[in-house]
Image: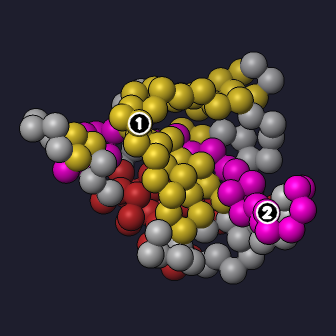
Amino acid sequence: MRIVIQRVSSASVSVDGKITGKIDNGLLILAGFEHADTHEDLEWMVGKITRLRIFNDNEGVMNLSVMDVNGDILVVSQFTLHAKTKKGNRPSYVNAAPSNISIPLYEKFIEMLEDSIGKKVEQGVFGAMMDVSLVNSGPVTIIIDSKNRDL
């Protein structure tokens, strides 16, 4: 599982001009799933996301988590996070899980995040052509990969 986290002051996702998810202060998470992802990957990722200290404290130091600031979360599925670009100029997505694997993982990921933060997680529409708007606060953008935990 690979994610891109962006600390935002606002973010929204829309499909065909209709907003499907919208947040103010919090995290926009772009999430991509691969064939080998398991429940353990989801658990690890949820723990990492909810404890990641990337919000400023009173001294302006990134020392607070999304839970500490009572922030919101917006999750958008993005299979292109698993693009392979080694050969040629057209990315290959062979590592991205097909929908019969990724949809249940995505749904479980949302459920686990909601359980962890104790409130609704906003989201896009899985597999749809989406327009994502955001105001990246900082900017703060972090990539996390459950298969490469050294990133």
Residue toward you, 13 or 115: 13
Q: Which residue is drawn at 63% across and 45% down?
A: 76
Q: In which quarter of the image is residue 95?
A: bottom right
**Does dot 2 land on a helix, a strand or a loop?**
loop
Q: Is residue 86 on the magenta stretch?
A: yes
What numbered label is drawn on residue 29?
none
Considering the image in quadrants, where does the N terminus appear?
bottom right
The image shows residue 139, relative to residue 103, as above or below, that is: above
Residue 95, visible in the rendered structure: yes
Q: In which quarter of the image is residue 102?
A: bottom right
Q: Is residue 88 on the magenta stretch?
A: yes
Residue type at numbered disc 1: Pro
Is 62 left, or right, of 19 in this rendering? left
Of the residues under marks 1 and 2, which one precedes in the sequence?
2
The residue indicated by pointer 1 is 139
The residue segment tinted magenta is 63-90
Give the CA distance from mark 1 to mark 2. Answer: 26 Å
Q: Which residue is drawn at 10% across and 36% down?
A: 58
Q: Residue at x 71, y 21 (%)?
A: 18
Q: Position of residue 31 (x, y in %)?
A: 61, 55
**Does dot 1 land on a helix, a strand or a loop?**
strand
Q: Where is residue 132 in the image (x, y as percent from the top left)?
A: 64, 31
The image shows residue 25, relative to residue 6, as above or below, that is: above
What numbered label is drawn on residue 85?
2
- Which residue occupies the extreme top position in the image? 17
Residue 104, visible in the rendered structure: no
